[in-house]
Image (cartoon, rainbow, N blue to C red):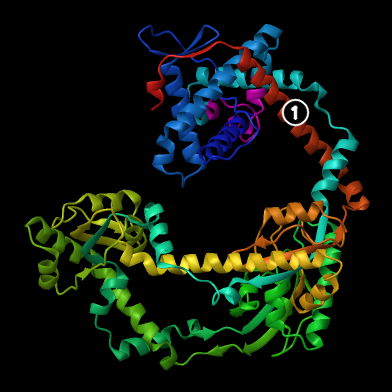
Amino acid sequence: MLDKIRQNAQSWVVKALFGVIIIVFIFFFGTGGFNDKADPIMAYVDERPISAQEFSRSFNEFRDNLRRQNPNISTEELQDPRLRNIFLNDMITSRLLEDKARALGVAFSGPEMIAAIAANPAFQNQDRAFDPEAYSQALARIGLTASQFEQDFRTDKTIRKLEAFATLPAQATPFAARQVFSWVKEKVDLEYAALPADEFMAAAKVEEAEVKDFYENNKERFKRPAMIRVRYLAFTPRDLAPLQEVSGDEARAYYQANSGSFVRPEQVRARHILIKAGKDATSAEIKRAGEDVRELRQAILSGRDFAETAKARSQDPSAKTGGDLGWFGRGVMVPEFEEAAFGLKKGELSEPVRTPFGWHLILVEDRRDQAQLDFEQVKDDILKAIAEEKASDKISELLDQAMDRLASGMTLAKIADDLGLVSKQSGLLTLQEARQQFGLTEDAAAALFSLPPGESAKTPLAIDGGLLLAEKVEDSPETILPLDEVKQSIAAFLKRQEAMKLAKDKAQALLKELSDPASAKAAAAGLAKLIRASGPLGRRDPLPGLGLNPQLLADAFSARTGDWLPQAYAFPDKVIIARLSKRLPALDQDWEKEKDLWLKAATAQNRQELFMAFATELRDRAKIELLRPDLLN
């Protein structure tokens, strides 16, 4: 349970750190020791102190756990003062809950704690019996003594008991759970017409004064970050390979020894259309998606272009390219898709194919049979492979020689000449670009940026595939780009904005015509060729091929069937108008299958909200004094 609480704490901190509002409290650690009178007091909670030592111990353990659970979290995030503030607030909440439990006589007894710890598999031997040695080792790995762990464990369990007591009225009724189920599972079908911004670009006009005003009011957008230019010697097989000599005889011998590796597998080139119905889809959603795919298949067989249909209807990212998947061999796609694709002839259209992602239509545009590649087809690859192998054997020796010369004060250009290597000079690079170009760690890139111009890094820097010797050539400080350098991009941006505005104005005018009985019929007839069907959409689903627009979905679920939605909706390069074609309510049979899960989920949500309100009330009534805010920075 303690691990679970810490994981929740991790979730709270990460989400809170990035401004995400979540309704969950973290109950982490107990009161800790307070015997050192010289230890500063950070805060008082109803006259009970939280010492700096206690806070530091708890926070450091929490941070270490956070780092273990999130290896990609940055040092800056872990050192952010907001992290300490959040953690202190959670300690205060935990303290108040612990005090309330004590006042109500809620406790976790010694025998209960012994039984709970002994039942933890992490503390057991192979016979599933409690093992003191395993217990000590497990605590040592997370930097806790037995007394610290047991105190924290008791606090956690006590708060859990208090939560169970405080949330007794939280049991959800079947009616309430059904309401949530019906709301979440309801879907809508839309018909929509899109007005591309490109069609309004010619009419969009931007004055020079507008460009200048935009620049003056948005200069921060045109800030060029600090950049450096470096000269470098890369000691990697790839970089040293061009300096190696490889004979044709070596290459041919390599080919003959490894001919089995030079076989081109059977491949197909295909396009596909996906109508989503994933593993969480209900039977009704799966059925509807299958029906949509069968309709699309019939339309394609009747002459509709596959690529254009994929662009309009596919719910896969490949929709932008007409469903193009390029060439692929076996073992790349999921088994159901692979079996269908490799079972088709060139130019053949598949039957609907069900995969874990939904329903697909597959069009095989070309095929390649398995074939042995001859020497000339793979000669260049073989020469490169042998050269890299030779280069790999020389890296250590060459690097040692280069380091000796660097220590004597030679420049990288001179070192390269001496060793028969090639030094290279980069363009101006930002910190992020330097990391990406060379595969540097964050610390290595920062060290490179901190060098004065003309200085070399004293030690090799680790990069992808090897090591790097680097010398800073030039510094370019952070600066605001002059207007002349950015006015064309500003003008293009403003022109696109104006085109989107014109498209929206046109869309609003069309909506006005569609809502007027006198012009509705003619307007609808004019739109007939532009109308597309969305397919079933949930409350958080993107419009296929266009993206997500929350306001569109909110209006769609509030509309009456057949009504045009009240406004035009902007997407990255289009504006659309839409009407509600039909509602697809949640199905009774799905409710019967999932009822228990929804009841549990609704009850858990009620418990969470009720206990949060309980803890918030405790905080509102408590006397909380923060004495050392400086210790949170």
In the picture as drawn, the residue positioned furthest to the front comes out as 518
Question: Which of 565 and 468 lies nearest the eye of the viewer?
Answer: 565
Residue 21 horizontal/vertical position (percent): 60, 37
Q: Is residue 405 left or right of residue 144?
A: left
Is residue 39 placed above or below 431 in the rendered structure?
A: above
> Which part of the image, by quadrant, shows the N terminus?
top right
Residue closest to the eye, 449 or 216:
216
Q: Nearer the viewer, residue 459 or 389?
A: 459
Residue that carries the numbered disc 1 in the rendered image:
607
Residue 286 on image: x %, y %: 83, 63
Image quadrant assignment for residue 200: bottom right
| Secondary structure beneath label 1 | helix
**Magenta-drawn segment:** 114-135
Q: Residue 136 location in percent, x, y?
A: 51, 26
- The amino acid type of the residue labelled 1 equals Arg
Name the residue: 48% across, 65% down. Answer: 494
Residue 321's image quarter?
bottom right
Counting the numbered discs, the total is 1
Which residue is outermost to the left? 408
Say above or below: 320 vs 103.
below
Residue 186 shown in magenta: no
Q: Does the rendering let one see residue 611?
A: yes
- Horizontal arrangement in the rendering, residue 307 relative to residue 384 (left or right): right
Q: Is residue 140 visible?
A: no
Residue 162 rendering spot, x and y as whole percentages: 70, 18
Q: Quadrant of the C terminus?
A: top left
- Asked if 398 appears above or below 351 in the picture, the reply is above
Assess disc 1: are there few (<14), some (14-19) or many (≥20) residues with their C-alpha within 10 Å of its C-alpha. Answer: many
Horizontal side of 80 relative to 616 (left or right) equals left
| Residue 116 falls inside the magenta stretch | yes
Residue drawn at point x = 41 percent, y = 25 percent: 632
Looking at the picture, does residue 595 appear above or below residue 579?
above
